């Protein structure tokens, strides 16, 4: 039977279920039990209820009288005047600065058709098919479809609605009291924009007349006696003052962002993206969201980096309540930094956090222990870097900012970084661990610590082995992609590099190519014999991650649970099965008296290579990715050399003893 709209079945009984148009999706829908289990009756009754619902809702919309026609006409004239002025100024700048090209010509040709469609066809998901010219090229069609989507979002955005209401308040005291009023204003705005596009696309070629005031102010040279003209020294006009080149100080943002919750800020950023990226230089806004999107594009941020930076900037707006970059002061930076120190570490791990006000968040944090508050120094430095990139972009656009120094609120790095002291595996201890049932045979998938005949070659099996034969970090292996296993110069290797799921220690977000910490490590022959390459070949057919089974299951109702790919929001890869590893170490090593951990395998590889004859330090560093201070590594081993050849790396890896 065809599914009927608004028909909902629960426990074999049918209900009418419909949301109220215009309200948040967090508002519960209207639900009316139909009192029947008969699907045929339910379909008949649902049709009657749908008609009544529409009639009732339309009557609510018409309770308030519409705006007077005379007022709408005045409003149209004002919108037309402003739209025409803005458009002519933009066109003048583009033409006179040499920025008006073929793309702009195509845009100017398509915009009138698009606004005609808004008026005649309404706002659609895509450009109506009857508006498409059969003679258009593929490039023209793509441009029309993209421009239609951008302009539709712009006209219907909350920023535009705020502009329309503000413009009405400037000419009248009549308030906007309903959806019909807003529809009238939007229609007048679209008509004005269409008329401006028709009139303003052609440059004004008329000679500007000399005004009467200019004529009177000019010296009456013709009235001077001829003799005086001959005897008087030549009158030299004073040189024109050089043009003042000032920083751009755009008009205030057209609409202030709703910084009440992180959810409203996320919606604001989503709505602002296309408008910000499609804006010409003359249309650049000082809104933080707009500046951020242009900064993300100019810095060529990856999707993962862009999402993180965007979250950092939204939290800055959430705390400070600011919507425009030219409002930021040093005091705001200090207040923001101080507030982050008392923010709960678990903020935004629950979906409910996105709908809490700043006061609610801080009130809830006041009862938490000190260890659950504040950001780590590395995370705080990332937040500061996000604001620095935002301010740098604003200055590059000519925004006149006050003296700002985000570095004053950035945690300082210690002059000498000391790694956490961890015990190092000895060869016999490592071999004892890999004799555990996880690697030699267990009872079942749920009984991995009990001896049996089943061997499951999944993340629990492979990740410790790969670490023991490469010296990589846990997150580097647990979060690697299947495509990171490659064959280079005939040698099977693992390319340890940042990806959209996780970064690399010591590599900044959005690092340039020459700043990346990518490492290439040959694959030990023992791993190949155990079937690692066959495992990788099968994994390529599924999730991009090589070990998707180690991605922790999202908590119900969390942001990760609602994400299309929960793996993108994992904070630390490998933590999900730490308990299994610790138990394996404890059982295999008689209660693990030396407190060995998974990272001790990395230390084992480093220690083994460090004391292995014939293995140079640079070979070990190139494979393990140690980040050394300048005073620890000479310029000969850090700068004046190339990457260690793969055959030398392979010889070093093959020298590691077999552990199974």
Image (cartoon, rainbow, N blue to C red):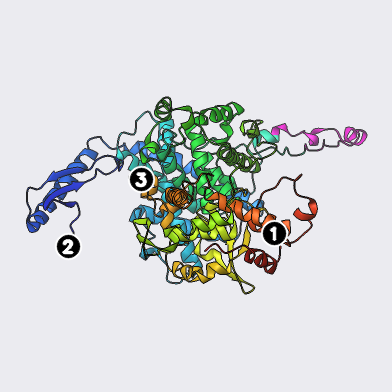
- The region drawn magenta spans 216-241
Q: Residue at x 60, y 53 (%)?
A: 604
Q: CA distance from mark 3 to mark 1?
A: 46 Å
Residue identifier under label 2: 2
Residue identifier under label 3: 555
Between disc 3 and disc 2, the foreground one is 3
Q: In the rendered view, does 178 fall on the left or right side of 56?
A: right
So how many labels did they put on this image?
A: 3
Classify the position of the N terminus by image quarter: bottom left
> Residue 617, how many percent across, how many down?
72, 56
Q: Earlier in the sequence, mark 3 or mark 1?
A: 3
Q: In the rendered view, does 404 fall on the left or right side of 581?
A: right
Residue identifier under label 1: 612
Circle 1 packing at 10 Å, graded few (<14), some (14-19), many (20+), is few
Q: CA distance from mark 3 to mark 2?
A: 35 Å
Is residue 427 shown in magenta?
no
- Residue 411 vs 587, above or below: the answer is above
């Amino acid at each position: 039977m065809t599914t009927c709209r608004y028909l909902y079945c629960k426990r074999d009984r049918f209900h009418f279920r419909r949301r109220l148009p215009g309200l948040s999706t967090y508002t519960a829908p209207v639900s009316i039990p139909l009192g029947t289990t008969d699907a045929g009756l339910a379909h008949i009754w649902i049709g009657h209820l749908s008609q009544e619902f529409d009639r009732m809702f339309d009557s609510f919309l018409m309770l308030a009288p519409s705006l007077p026609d005379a007022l709408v006409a005045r409003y149209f004239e004002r919108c037309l005047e402003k739209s025409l002025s803005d458009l002519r100024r933009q066109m003048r700048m583009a033409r006179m600065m040499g920025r008006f090209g073929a793309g702009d010509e195509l845009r100017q040709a398509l915009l009138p058709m698009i606004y005609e469609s808004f008026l005649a066809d309404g706002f659609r998901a895509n450009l109506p098919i009857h508006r498409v010219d059969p003679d258009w090229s593929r490039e023209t069609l793509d441009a029309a479809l993209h421009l239609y989507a951008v302009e539709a979002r712009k006209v219907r955005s909350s920023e535009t609605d705020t502009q329309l209401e503000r413009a009405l308040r400037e000419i009248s005291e009549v308030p906007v009291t309903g959806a019909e009023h807003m529809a009238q204003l939007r229609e007048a705005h679209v008509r004005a924009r269409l008329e401006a596009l028709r009139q303003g696309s052609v440059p004004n070629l008329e000679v500007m007349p000399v005004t009467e005031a200019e004529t009177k102010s000019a010296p009456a040279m013709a009235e001077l006696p001829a003799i005086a003209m001959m005897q008087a020294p030549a009158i030299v006009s004073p040189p024109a003052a050089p043009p003042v080149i000032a920083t751009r100080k755009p008009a205030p943002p057209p609409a202030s962002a709703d910084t009440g919750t992180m959810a409203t800020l996320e919606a604001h950023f989503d709505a602002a993206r296309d408008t910000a990226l499609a804006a010409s230089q003359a249309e650049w806004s000082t809104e933080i969201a707009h500046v951020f999107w242009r900064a993300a594009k100019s810095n060529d941020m990856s999707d993962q980096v862009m999402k993180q930076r965007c979250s950092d900037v939204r939290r800055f707006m959430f705390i400070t309540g600011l919507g425009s970059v030219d409002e930021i002061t040093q005091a705001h930076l200090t207040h923001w930094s101080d507030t982050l120190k008392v923010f709960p570490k678990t903020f935004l791990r629950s979906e409910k956090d996105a709908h809490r006000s700043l006061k609610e968040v801080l009130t809830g944090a006041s009862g938490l222990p000190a260890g659950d508050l504040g950001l780590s120094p590395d995370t705080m430095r990332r937040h500061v870097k996000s604001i620095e990139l935002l301010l740098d972009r604003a200055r590059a656009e000519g925004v006149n900012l006050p003296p700002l120094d985000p570095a004053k609120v950035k945690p300082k790095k210690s002059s000498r970084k000391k790694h956490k002291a961890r015990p190092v595996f000895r060869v016999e201890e490592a071999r004892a661990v890999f004799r555990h049932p996880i690697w030699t045979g267990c009872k079942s998938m749920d009984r991995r610590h009990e001896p049996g005949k089943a061997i499951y070659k999944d993340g629990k099996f492979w990740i410790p082995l790969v670490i023991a034969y490469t010296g990589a970090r846990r997150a580097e292996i647990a979060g690697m992609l299947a495509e990171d296993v490659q064959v280079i110069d005939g040698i099977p290797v693992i390319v340890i590099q940042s990806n959209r799921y996780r970064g690399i220690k010591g590599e900044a977000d959005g690092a340039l190519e020459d700043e990346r910490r990518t490492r290439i490590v040959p694959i030990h022959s023992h791993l190949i014999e155990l079937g690692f390459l066959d495992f990788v070949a099968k994994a390529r057919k599924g999730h991009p991650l090589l070990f998707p089974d180690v991605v922790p299951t999202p908590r119900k109702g969390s942001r990760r649970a609602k994400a299309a790919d929960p793996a993108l929001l994992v904070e630390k890869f490998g933590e999900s099965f730490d308990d299994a590893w610790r138990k394996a170490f404890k059982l295999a090593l008689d209660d693990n008296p030396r407190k060995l951990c998974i990272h001790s395998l990395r230390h084992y590889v480093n220690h083994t290579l460090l004391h292995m004859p014939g293995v140079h330090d640079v070979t070990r560093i190139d494979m393990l990715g140690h980040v050394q201070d300048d005073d620890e590594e000479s310029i000969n081993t850090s700068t004046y050399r190339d990457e260690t050849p793969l055959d030398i790396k392979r010889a070093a890896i093959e020298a590691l003893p077999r552990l199974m």
